[in-house]
Image (cartoon, grey):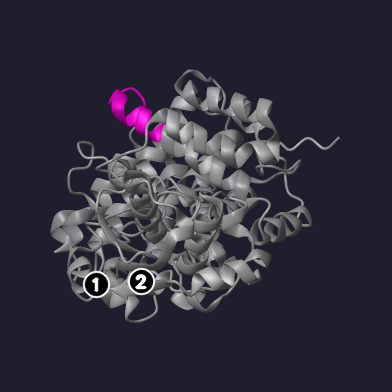
Amino acid sequence: MESRLNLTDTLSAYIAQDRTGTLPQHIIERAKIHILDTLGAMISGSGLKPGRLITDFVRTQGGAPEATIASTDIRTNAIMAALANGVMAHADETDDTHFSTVTHPGSVVVPASLAVAERGHCSGMELISAVVLGYDVMCRLVKALDRTWMQGRCIHTGSVCANFGATASASRLLRLPISQVRFALAFAGTQASGLTTWRQDLEHIEKALCYSGIPARNGVTAALWAQAQFTATPDVFEGSENFIRAFAEQPKPEELIRDLGSHYEILDAGIKKYPAGQPMQQTLEAYFTLLREHSLRSQDIREIIVRLPDTQALTINDRHMPDVNCQYLLAVAMLDGSVDFKSSHDFNRMQDSDVLELKKRVQIIADPELTSKFPAVRSAIVELIMSDGMHYQVLVDRVPGAPSNPLSEKEVAEKFLSLSNPVLGAERSKAIVTGVGGLEQIPDVAELAAMLVQIHN
């Protein structure tokens, strides 16, 4: 079926075509919000262990000063910059999520696009167009494959397909002709990898590499190889030996090119309100909603029952990392009345006696009904049982920041400032917000990249 669809022909032509003048205004605005959100994840991630390690590593590698690593004084080649910024963007769980494919496109596509755009002195509008394209290609390819089949074989669909999203963005920014785009896509396929072994890594380092850093690096590499006249198969999605056959038992190849140019996958991506894993978004929103609407006091809570889809319940059930540990984050919420970036990444606080005591009050249940609606609906039912015996319960199925309930430009800017101010300072952080807000007017992305530099006094 792939051959009849001419997948490689259609996709390569779409990638090679300049669409900076045809993007709808609401897509431009949405892209700027996701770019700003990803920059915030990069900046905050620079201080976490994965970010610190990748920065130290890249600093030893040298390389032509083509692109900036956020929150550092390092400029290196575009490949290494994409790797480092990708790792930092997914150093924790602050980055965006594409709901229907359960992927994190921003942490791959934005670092890859930013590195190539800075290298080539591309305009802000070119960067926006490339980012939108990267979301389109990455997420459509996930839909074309067989995610369940791949998961059963420990293959991470998001990582495998992210290679292609980053490759598409980089190819567009390098202005590759169709013939070279076809080769770049082949090189994306050649590098495609990603194992779910990251689930066994307690420090999020392998996950940051698998989800984002490596695919961002691979995509930039693939496009640069094609630009340098490397040749490969011109039909990576066709023939008896092709990419889709390798990774799908029951593929849907038509999804790769369905509605290209009319539906934009970035509209199906959500931005997290809280600095924590995606399943915690609806959980924390439900908890704070109950306290606010019923004027409850956290010190009067005897028990909290959290119902989630089965995979999400497993993801946040007393995990090693604080930002995906439901019991810990609800204990912090009870103690502090809020959850911020500092508390959601405080490993030491996880052992505090008051936290340990409150964690005992939290029970997590995998709910079959919620499971049946996942991932189309990301929902949670939270019940509070008070010391006087009263029960309060709420269902949250329209998470703030979800595609159906998006955060406003102001809310995303506030989130960005909360992440960036402690690292880059209030003045520079505000300048980044302003710069991204007018990104389509910036003639050279290097202007934006310069704002990300960490100045050491």
Question: Which amino acid, by three-letter code, is at mark 1?
Answer: Asp
Q: Is residue 197 above or below residue 77?
A: below
Q: Are marks 1 and 2 in contact (CB under 8 Å)?
A: yes
For label 2, the residue is 313
Which mark is on residue 367?
1
Q: Quadrant of residue 292?
A: top left
Rendered-image quadrant of the N terminus: bottom left
Question: Which amino acid, by three-letter code, is at mark 2?
Answer: Ala
Q: Position of residue 173 (x, y in %)?
A: 47, 36
Going 46% across and 70% down the picture, which residue do you hit?
194
Which mark is on residue 191?
none
Q: Position of residue 386 (x, y in %)?
A: 37, 63
Q: Position of residue 188 (x, y in %)?
A: 43, 59
Residue nearer the viewer, 100 or 176: 100
Left or right: where 16 falls relative to 210: left
Q: Is residue 282 above or below residue 320?
A: above
Q: Residue furthest right?
A: 457
Q: Residue furthest bottom?
A: 153
Going 53% across and 52% down the picture, which residue do you hit?
225
